[in-house]
Amino acid sequence: MDDPIPLSALQHFVFCPRQYALIHIEQVWTENEQTARGRGQHERAHGGGSEERDGVRTLRALPLVSREHGLFGVADVVELLPDGSPRPVEYKSGRAKSRLADEVQLCAQALCLEEMFSGSIPGGYIYHVASRKRREVTFTPELRAAVLAARDGIRELLRSRRLPEPAADDRCQLCSLYDECEPFAPRDFPAGYDPFETRPIP
Ligand code: SF4
């Protein structure tokens, strides 16, 4: 049986497979201002405990697991509606990640909650800390399939132990691993080029 995949890994992989590999396989992590702010906000959201307001119970730092889908992690916030059904809420400090990375992470939480609470969850929320606004995300069949595709992609990468090629596009500008990744550095010497050959100084 394959090892379960952490929910945070799905987000990194969907955003950029190389970022996933650098963080989760090569254990490279660099903190910048944005990640430090995000970590502080996650730690506050992950402070644990619960509260109730207007019939909605808010659970913080809820451990999640899906044996069926091979996923595990911790939800920032899960709201229990008056009928007892759960809705995941993921806190984000930075700009929305491209390629539905945040949505895939949120939907993966829902897959875990559906198994844990034995029910269907139609949607959840991403809460943007900077604007203090939440936006609704519908868990469509396509988004659910994207979660499982990312999980399978991660497993394939773990088997291959291969560091993916850099994305080298607009994703890199705000990436906290830019310096370690060197996405725009030349990687191959031209044919016939010997880097150790002694050359006259022009
Ligand atoms: S710098 Fe670009 S290629 Fe490298 S990990 Fe970040 S997003 Fe991926």
Image (cartoon, grey):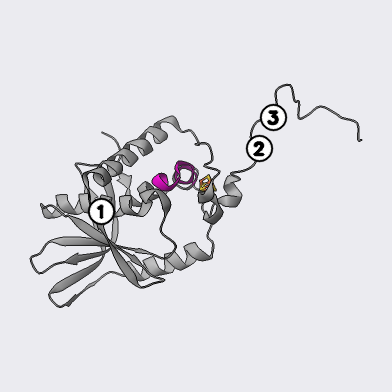
Of 181 and 160, the residue lying toward us = 181
Q: Residues within 10 Å of mark 2 (few under 14, many from 20)?
A: few
Compared with 180, 155 (above or below) is above
Q: CA distance from mark 2 to mark 1?
A: 39 Å
Q: Is mark 3 within 8 Å of ligand 1?
A: no
Q: Amino acid at mark 1?
A: Gln
Residue at 44% x, 63% y is 94
Residue at 43% x, 30% y is 160
| CB atoms of marks 2 and 3 within 8 Å | yes
Compared with 90, 153 (above or below) is above
The residue where tag 3 is placed is 189
SS assignment at label 1: helix
**Is 16 one of the magenta-colored residues?**
yes
- Which residues lie in the magenta part? 13-22
Of 188 and 196, the residue lying toward us = 188
Q: Is mark 2 within 8 Å of ligand 1?
A: no
Q: Which corner quadrant of the image does residue 185 belong to?
A: top right
The residue where tag 2 is placed is 186
Q: Position of residue 61 (x, y in %)?
A: 28, 64
The residue where tag 1 is placed is 109
Residue 126: mark = none
Q: Position of residue 95 (x, y in %)?
A: 44, 61
Q: Amino acid at mark 3?
A: Phe
**Is 31 one of the magenta-colored residues?**
no
